[in-house]
Amino acid sequence: MSITRLWRERPVLAGRWTLKDIVQGKPLGHPSHAMFVHFPSALLPAAFVFDIVSLVHADITLTRAAFYNIAFGLFVAIFAAITGLVDYLPMIGGSRKKQLGTYHLVLQLTAVSAFALSLLIRAFDYDADQTPIVALLLAGVGSGAIVIGNYFGGTLVYRQGMRVSVDGL
């Protein structure tokens, strides 16, 4: 059996949904990408806020909160990326949706990369009372990329109607 057939054609859940359907959230009646994106969108910029506050008020609690926000945000971002790619790949090349999706994808990859590097730097100075400046700058770049990338993702949904259905998925 080919992977394509398993992915698109062969039902794997309740004799009804394919693997692609499951990843897209069809058994839940709700797009799955939207369920995952909120966590990284909130946790990662919150880590940047903790970083800024740690510069004003040195406290290990703030740097640890930022560290764990980034770790959990990156973990959930894996699921957001997988479900987002499942929506992105079948888009028609050259279309406005594909263009917006590409902007969204590139900015979110930039954000995840910046936060992953920031987390790596923090791991080498785990007991710091203040966030290392390079880690803070990377978190700032990542936060900016998330905000702009989320704008493009929102434009895809609210202006282009991507994965919006009035009669179920």
Image: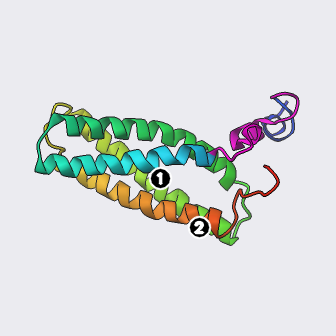
Work out whether residue 112 can be spotted.
no
Q: Amino acid at mark 1?
A: Leu
For marks 2 and 1, the one nearer the N-term is 1
- Is-magenta flag for residue 139? no
Q: Position of residue 155 (x, y in %)?
A: 59, 67
Residue 44, numbered circle: none
Pointer 1: residues within 10 angstroms few (<14), some, or many (20+)?
some
Q: 158 or 143, which is in the foreground? A: 158
Q: Residue furthest front?
A: 166
Q: Is residue 7 left or right of residue 135?
A: right
Foreground disc of the pair 2, 1: 2
Circle 2/circle 1 CB separation < 8 Å: no
Residue for badge 1? 109
Query: For the magenta stretch, what is the residue range?
Result: 13-32
Q: How far from the left and from the top, in percent, is residue 28?
A: 72, 38
Please give the label number shown on residue 155. 2
Q: Residues within 10 Å of mark 2 (few under 14, many from 20)?
A: some
Label 1: which secondary element: helix
Residue under the point 61% across and 47% down: 33
